[in-house]
Image: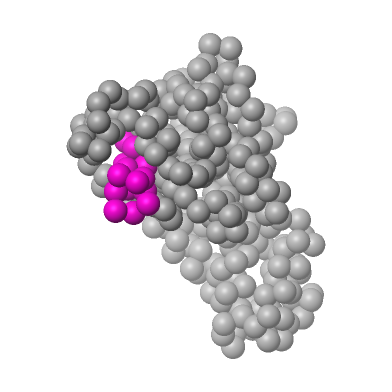
């Protein structure tokens, strides 16, 4: 955490990498709350995948041209169309122009002090080359005024940011990358111990160790368990069961929502079910499921973007989250997600 805050205050652009529920957003927002930089913008790419639109809208809302001159602005869905978007400066009197005619450049420069911009879950942004061009422009012309922190998993647009080709507009720019993974057993146990002590909840170290083993270092589920255990009279077994019930409810809603948005979700569910028990390589999946390589590659890429699946050094695909695996093992009507 301290390193993240220090990097932001020194103006270094940062990338936080990791799967869902691993704590990227929590870490990023916590760092924002601790930094001395007052001008802050948060963009959620899951709700608005057009970076130009969301960034322009956020800058307009927070700049000196609006009633609000500083503070935190969060941009999600329902933004609506914006009439004019431009990287460069627009000629004419800024004070007399309509808001939709301002450029991103002049809005950034309108701030009297540094601004930090959090782009959350950037793998959902559209148009990788357009995103790279926009980021390169901000980096080259406004590095002293704007600091970016980007979170996501290393697929889609994120990959083009992290590993730009020599032809990419973003090639050669320096980024500080921090990969966020599962907590170690000792970190997970320490987290639950501290939470129990702070709330005055009696606990047994052996019991908490069993919880850590079950939740496999996923910060999101450990936090949920800690809240349920510390805020009730439940035993650790009851709290763990309640955690699983609540996690399954979250996963059911999540999978149903993804199924509505993702074409081919029936096939993606079949891939998840195929690797629930045993990790498999690409060719094995194609053979066992009867899916051609092009379709399989597309669907695995989507599952990686959704942070359900990871690939190890041996080329085997497996499910990241143990509770997702458990949810699928219980046969919770996967067919309904494909409708």
Q: Quadrant of residue 183?
A: bottom right
Q: What residue sits 58% from the left and 55% below the top?
A: 36
**Could you say where residue 123 lies in the image, as x and y percent from the top left?**
48, 36
Q: Is residue 305 above or below residue 283?
A: below
Total numbered circles: 0
Q: Nearer the viewer, residue 122 or 28?
A: 28
Asked if the stretch drawn in magenta spans residue 48, the answer is no
Residue 186 spot, x, y in % from top left: 79, 62
Q: State the image quarter where residue 172 is shown.
A: top right
Question: On screen, 126 above or below 328?
Answer: above
Residue 89 percent coordinates (x, y): 35, 24
Q: Which span of residues is magenta-colored?
A: 53-69
Picture quadrant of residue 260: top left
Q: Residue at x 43, y 55 (%)?
A: 71
Between 41 and 26, the one nearer to me in the picture:
41
Tell me: 88 left or right of 16: left
Quadrant of the rendering where the C terminus is positioned? top left
Residue 338 visible in the picture = no
What x and y, as percent, mark residue 222?
63, 65
Is 29 positioned to the left or the right of 199 in the image? Answer: left
Is residue 247 visible to us here? yes
Residue at 49 percent of width and 25 percent of height: 141
């Amino acid at each position: 955490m301290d390193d993240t805050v220090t990097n932001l205050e020194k103006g270094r652009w940062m990338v936080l990498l990791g799967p869902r529920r691993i704590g990227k957003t929590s870490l990023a927002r916590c760092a924002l709350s601790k930094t001395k930089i007052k001008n802050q913008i948060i963009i959620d790419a899951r709700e608005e995948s057009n970076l130009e639109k969301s960034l322009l809208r956020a800058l307009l809302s927070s700049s000196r041209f609006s009633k609000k001159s500083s503070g935190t602005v969060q941009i999600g869905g329902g933004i609506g169309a914006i009439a004019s978007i431009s990287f460069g400066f627009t000629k004419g009197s800024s004070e007399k122009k309509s808001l939709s005619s301002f450029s991103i450049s002049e809005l950034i420069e309108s701030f009297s002090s540094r601004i930090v911009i959090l782009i959350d879950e950037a793998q959902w942004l559209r148009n990788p080359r357009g995103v790279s061009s926009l980021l390169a422009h901000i980096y080259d012309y406004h590095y002293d005024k704007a600091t970016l922190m980007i979170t996501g998993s290393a697929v889609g647009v994120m990959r083009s940011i992290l590993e730009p080709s020599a032809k990419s507009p973003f090639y050669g720019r320096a980024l500080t990358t921090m990969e966020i993974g599962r907590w170690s057993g000792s970190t997970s146990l320490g987290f639950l111990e501290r939470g129990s002590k702070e709330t005055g909840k009696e606990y047994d170290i052996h019991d908490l160790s069993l919880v850590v083993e079950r939740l496999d270092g996923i910060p999101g589920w450990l936090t949920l368990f800690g809240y349920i255990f510390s805020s009730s009279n439940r035993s650790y077994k009851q709290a763990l069961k309640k955690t699983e019930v609540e996690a399954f409810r979250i996963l059911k809603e999540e999978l149903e929502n993804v199924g509505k948005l993702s074409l081919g979700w029936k096939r993606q569910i079949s891939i998840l079910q195929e690797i629930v028990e045993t990790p498999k390589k690409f060719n094995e999946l194609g053979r066992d499921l009867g899916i051609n390589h092009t379709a399989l590659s597309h669907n695995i890429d989507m599952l990686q973007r959704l942070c359900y699946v990871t690939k190890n050094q041996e080329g085997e695909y497996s499910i990241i989250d143990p509770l997702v695996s458990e949810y699928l093992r219980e046969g919770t009507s996967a067919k309904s997600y494909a409708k």
